[in-house]
Image: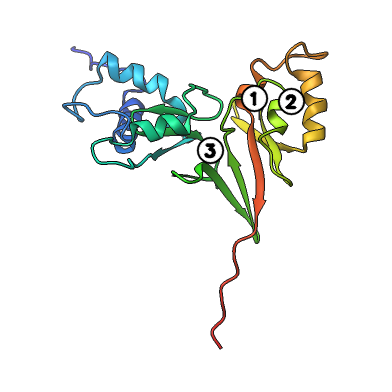
Amino acid sequence: MAKKARRAPNSQEQKKARSILIKKGLYKPKNPRGPLTDYAKKLLRKFSDVTAGKASVVTAKAEKKGNKGFKEARAANTGENRPGTVRTVRNKIIVPTQTGEQARYSKKEGVRVTRRVGNDVYVRRPFKRRPRSIAGVRSQLKEGDYIAVPLYRARSRGVEWTRMSPEDFTAFLTQYGPKATKREYENLLDYIEISSIEQPKRERRII
């Protein structure tokens, strides 16, 4: 008796993930419904954070005609490929996000990730210049800003962003940064972001 051919493991999951990349503009295959190519599988590995819902994709709009937004996207990444904060592909910006967070991009403000809690809006945004030291971190903070530090949770539960004051982060960096006194977090300064709280403007009442 002929045996049924077994489907490749996770083929349906892979096709579903491929459709996410197509929808997000990260993959433009000639045949969107065809067999998974080796290149498609490579992209699934590369953008696994997007297909798993751990990162959002925003589009940088061009200032001038014919630019397509490539230059603006690179500017949002300060020309450096930092997987902990943002990375770019053409005019697409991949931003780490969690449930309840929204990523946006504008030329004026760059990349912003927001989460609303009550009347407050928590904002995360990458450093415009890669900080090399605590002095480089502090020089880019405004009054009231905090540092957002991504800490990995156990059992592949993703990343939890922890807000630290400049003073607390200085102590944390001493313990876990370069030449740490405790277990070192590799490339810690590449992954931190600026954190702030904004209060939405009150709507004007019409009497």
Q: What is the quadrant of the C terminus in the image?
A: bottom right
For the point 52% across and 23% down, the residue is: 82
- Amino acid at dot 1: Pro
Disc 3 target residue: 97
Give the residue pinned by disc 1: 131
Q: Position of residue 99 (x, y in %)?
A: 54, 43
Q: Which residue is mark 2?
A: 134
Q: Nearer the viewer, residue 101 or 127?
A: 127
Say which amino acid is labelled 2: Ile
Discs 3, 1 touching: Cβ within 8 Å: no
Image quarter in which the N terminus is found: top left
Going 65% across and 34% down the picture, which residue do you hit? 160
Q: Earlier in the sequence, mark 3 or mark 2?
A: 3
Residue in the image at 33% along x and 28% along y = 90
Are dots 2 and 1 in contact, CB under 8 Å? yes
Residue 20, which numbered label? none
